[in-house]
Structure formats: C-alpha cells, structure tokens
Amino acid sequence: MDTFSNHLTEAVIATFKDTPERHRHLFASLVSHLHAFVIENECTTTEWMSCLTFLETVGKHCSEERNEFILLSDVLGVSALVDAINHRRPEVATPNTVLGPFFHEESPRINHADSIVHQDTVGERVLVKARVKNLRGEPIRGALIDVWETDGNGEYDVQRHEKDEPLQQDCRGHLYSNEHGQVELLALKPVAYPLPTDGPVGAMLLSCKRSIYRPAHVHFKITAQGYDPLVTALYTYDDTYVDIDAVFGVKEALKVKYERSLGKHPWLLCPEFILITEEEAQVRRNH
C-alpha cells in the first residue's frame, strides 16, 4: 500500500510538470496534503463521498447575495490564516482581520459627525471619535474610512432586504479624515450575532457542537495614499463570544471598551488606527 500510494502521489504531481512554477508548486502541495489526509485516516469510500457531497452542497448554496465557500473558509480558520500571512505588521500597528462577506465598495458618503444609521434602526447609538496615524504618531490626512456593522438585532442590511427590492444601505458609510487624522461619526454599539445555519456550513457547526456566534464588532476599512490598506474590526472586550469567535477574527489588540457618555448619545468609542506605509509593508512581505 505504501509503495502504491507514494507512486500514485508522485504520478499525479508529475502531471503538473508543464504548469507555471508557482501554480505547479501549489498543486503539488495540494495533492500531497490531500493524499496524506486520505492515507493517514484510511478514508472509506462512503466517507470520501460524504466529503464530496458536502462540497457540492456548499456550492449549491452560493448565490450573488451569499458565498457559502467563504463562510466555510472562515469557520475553518483558513481566511484568518491567509490574512495573517499576507499582513504581517509590527506590534504597534493596528492588526488586520478578516474582511467578511458584507463589505460594499459603494457605501453612502457621510460628513463628520453624521450617522451611518437610519433613524428608525434598532440599537443603542455610539459616538465614534477615531484617529488615523502612522508609526511615527503623525496624523494621516485624507484617509478613506469605510465603516459597516449589523443593526441591534444582529443583521446586516443585505440580510434584511427583500431580493426583489433595491438595497437600502444601513449601518454603513464612508468619510475622510481631517488634517488631524480624525473622523467622527454616529454608529450603533455592536451586538453579537449567529452565523447562518440554514446551509451546510451552519449544519456542520451545529453537528460538531461548535459555537455559531460572532462576538459584537464593527468593521473598518482604511485606505490612504502611500499606506498599506487596513481591513480590521473592533471587538467588544467583554462580549460573551469574544474568545470563541466562530471565524477566529479576534485579536487581543482589537478588543475595545465602550465608555458611557454624558452627552447626547449613551456610548462613546475613541479608537486609534495606526497604519504602515506601502514600503514598510513590502519589506515585511519580502522578508
């Protein structure tokens, strides 16, 4: 068996000999690991067919509004791993985290102190006063900050809208930092929410008795000329699920505490985002 399996693995890898170098390396590694998985576990035909059927079902649950394969990648920790490999920042810089499936390139433009939340949207309001700066502590002017989150019921706008109706964007928006690197906006104090369980990935989590919840968080995507783009999120430090995030996106430096406010809005959050330059990022990638 060992002789045959080794020969088979080598034979499959050899068929990629004329493939461009990087792809050849990736396919060879993929085949080697897949074969090793089957050999190590001595998979039965029924077990392997169950794997293929599961992947087929994942594909059938994909649509323009939903990508079940991204969800699978997330809950297996692959998305977080790829993200960590591709964004190696110094400890003082704000860490990256997974983008998630609910980002929109064309969110509503807002002015400073405006709200990203519809007036009748459920949830507690929080005033966010953020600052964007570089490793030297210098403010970054003109940085584009995209913000998005769920409503107080734990649903994104794309999950609430009817398929035949135009999307009414809510709990999302973008604005630019001023000369002091500052932005101010009104958002919602985030809440934890469950991943969808009506598909094969959710069914897998439930059958494995894993948590299906993401801890309370709000997403940020920050881009500025000359700087490495930052995709991150801020997680409520004392959330029930902050240490068992279903998609492994939480990092210690991204845990934040919301302060009670004496002003018009009940909550206040004052985060700082520290970016690195494109040159600094490229040096780390090359290393």
Image (cartoon, rainbow, N blue to C red):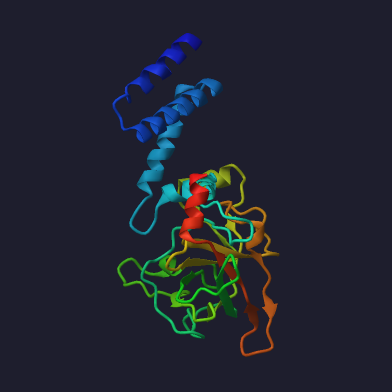
Q: Is residue 254 visible to us here?
A: yes
Instruction: Tell me if 57 is positioned left or right of 268 in this view.
Output: left
Residue at 67%, 63% in the rendered image: 239
Instruction: Tell me if 274 is positioned left or right of 260 in this view.
Output: left
**Residue 131: x and y, percent?**
57, 75
**Residue 256: x and y, percent?**
66, 67
The residue lying toward the viewer, choosing from 246 and 140, is 140
The residue lying toward the viewer, choosing from 46 and 101, is 101
Number of marks in the rendered image: 0
Q: Is residue 155 visible to us here?
A: no
Residue at 33%, 66% in the rendered image: 163
**Residue 142: x and y, percent?**
45, 76
Residue at 47%, 79% in the rendered image: 116
The residue lying toward the viewer, choosing from 11 and 240, is 11
Instruction: Tell me if 284 is positioned left or right of 270 in this view.
Output: left
Please identify the residue farthest to the bottom as the structure is shown: 264
**Residue 166: x and y, percent?**
32, 72
